[in-house]
Image (tube, rainbow, N blue to C red):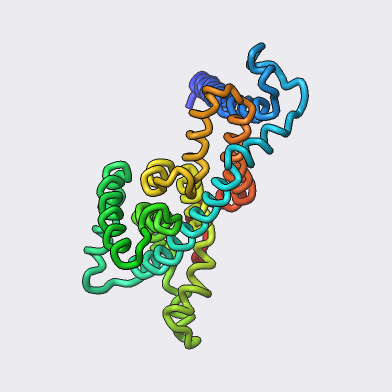
Amino acid sequence: MSRREQVVGEKTGAVSKALIYILLAVLTVTIVVPVAWVFMASVKQNSEFYGNPFALPQGIYLQNFADAWVKARMGDYFFTSILITAVALAILLIVALPAAYVLSRYKFWGSKLLNTCFMAGLFINVSYIVVPIFLMFVSGDKIVKGIFGHSFFLNNPFMVSLVLASTTLPFTIYLLSSYLATLPKDYEEAAYVDGAGYFTTMVRIILPMAKPSIITVILFEFLAYWNEYIISMTMLTDPNGARTLPVGLLNLMKAQNAKAEYGQMYAGMVMVMIPTLVLYMCVQKKLTQGMTLGGLKG
């Protein structure tokens, strides 16, 4: 390579890096500025919104959070979202971890068909099946009411968790199986020699090695469950019953359009965002380890 070509290559590389940095800076601004603005708006009094909406708050008005928590029932919605998300994650991991382990590590009659069925589930949009699920629950409630006198399928946070876990099961199994399939068989063979059974090998040997992928699944699905709206709105139909934060926040926004309680509305938005931000800060180091850690070297 001539000196001229080397200089041209260095200039091209420098220009490419500069463009990448500029693009990353623009993306950072477009993400950080709206989030920071919501946090600032949540501590403003209503009178401050009628002036310059982008001005800094004159003080920290925490009464917005108290009003949103109590008067707007965001506290009830918050705990309902925590319950539904925790139960959905528990159901998902209890089902997906053993399924992904078996499908990725063992070959048996029907394993290819099961893998194909789970992969087909990746192409099913939840929006397309939420109405059939709702109609099935309505029919099931009619039967349950006739026997026990009260409904079970609708307005039941546990059923919402079950539906959420079921709809995300194909993606979770696909993600975990892709990682578990890369782990060498040496660990399992050594465990079998030491007298460990299949379940013990999975729990004590394989799953600890799959911690990065499990943490990734927990983060992705937590975000999906926490921000989910369509299923929660469809399955929780009682206006005075349990509601999740996204559904409650939308109702709050509709109500505040008439009352003009903007600080209370933005305080509700902050309540929705804080858990996801805290979770990300707690697990972001694990996520940077990547999805292919573990296994034997050499």
Task: Identify the residue at horizontal 53%, vertical 33% (top origin).
Answer: 252
Q: In terms of depth relative to the viewer, which is nearer, 261 or 19?
A: 261
- Front position in the image: 283 or 95: 95
Q: Residue furthest right?
A: 59
Up-down: is 288 above or below 205? above
Residue 181, by quadrant, is bottom left
Whether residue 178 appears in this view of the structure is no
Q: Is residue 117 above or below residue 265?
A: below
For residue 54, which quarter of the picture? top right
24 vs 125, nearest the viewer: 125
Find residue 212 and report its horizontal and vertical position in percent: 53, 57
Q: How many marks?
A: 0
Please state which of residues 275 and 149 is positioned toward the viewer in this rendering: 149
Please provide percent x and percent y for residue 239.
45, 43
Q: Is residue 191 something that shows in the picture? A: yes
Tell me if 60 is positioned left or right of 117 in this view.
right
Farthest residue in the bottom direction?
Answer: 195
Q: Position of residue 258 (x, y in %)?
A: 53, 22
What residue is at 38 percent from the left and 42 percent from the top?
A: 230
Residue that appears at 73% across and 33% down: 62
Left or right: residue 156 versus residue 112 is right
- The residue drawn where x is 47% and y is 77% is 201
Residue 175 position by quadrant? bottom left
Q: Where does residue 88 sit, x and y in percent of width and height? A: 46, 57
As displayed, is residue 244 above or below residue 146? above
